[in-house]
């Protein structure tokens, strides 16, 4: 079984996604990057674009980042604030 991590994607006043993920691909200001389980810790700004979440059940869900945001990865979890 593939390794997962806890992912939260939140906007002001609403939680868009909270659960286990196989990966999340995000539009960083220096290029697109993918976070997977056991990713190195980081905090980075995001630009507008699409966040693509892959979950253990095989589903892929996309979220639009209209104005960018911030991603934090640490301790087996990732948080995306829009």
Image (cartoon, rainbow, N blue to C red):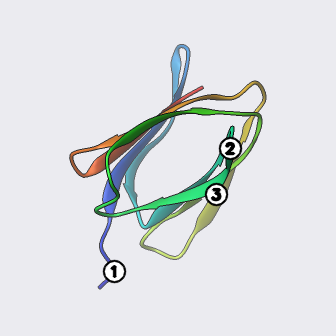
Q: Quadrant of the N terminus?
A: bottom left
Contact check, label 2 and label 3, Cβ < 8 Å:
no
Q: Is label 2 in a helix, a strand or a loop?
A: loop
Q: Which residue is mark 2?
A: 30
Q: Which residue is mark 1?
A: 2
Residue 46 lies left or right of residue 1; in this view the side is right
Q: Is label 1 in a helix, a strand or a loop?
A: loop
Q: Residue at x 60, y 25 (%)?
A: 82
* Furthest residue in direction top, as rendered: 13
Identify the disc placed on residue 40: none
Contact check, label 1 and label 3, Cβ < 8 Å:
no
Q: Which residue is mark 3?
A: 61
Marks 2 and 3, the one that precedes in the sequence: 2
Q: Residue at x 28, y 62 (%)?
A: 38
Contact check, label 1 and label 2, Cβ < 8 Å:
no
Asked where in the image residue 28 lies, by quadrant, the reply is: top right
The residue mark sitting in front, 1 or 2, is 2
Residue 78 coordinates in the image, percent (x, y): 38, 44
Q: CA distance from mark 1 to mark 3?
A: 18 Å
Tell me the crowding category of disc 3: few under 14, some 14 to 19, or many 20 or more residues within 10 angstroms, Cα based. Answer: few
Q: Residue at x 52, y 14 (%)?
A: 13
Residue 29 coordinates in the image, percent (x, y): 69, 37
Marks 1 and 2, the one that precedes in the sequence: 1
How many callouts does the rendering have?
A: 3
Q: Is residue 50 above or below residue 68?
A: below
Residue 65 coordinates in the image, percent (x, y): 72, 34
Q: Is residue 47 visible?
A: yes
């Amino acid at each position: 079984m593939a390794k997962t991590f806890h992912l939260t994607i939140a906007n002001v006043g609403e939680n868009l996604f909270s659960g286990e993920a196989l990966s999340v691909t995000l539009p960083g200001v220096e290029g697109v990057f993918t976070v997977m389980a056991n990713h190195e810790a980081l905090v980075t700004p995001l630009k507008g674009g699409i966040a693509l979440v892959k979950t253990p059940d095989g589903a892929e869900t996309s979220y639009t980042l209209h104005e960018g945001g911030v991603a934090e990865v640490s301790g087996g979890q990732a948080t995306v604030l829009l």
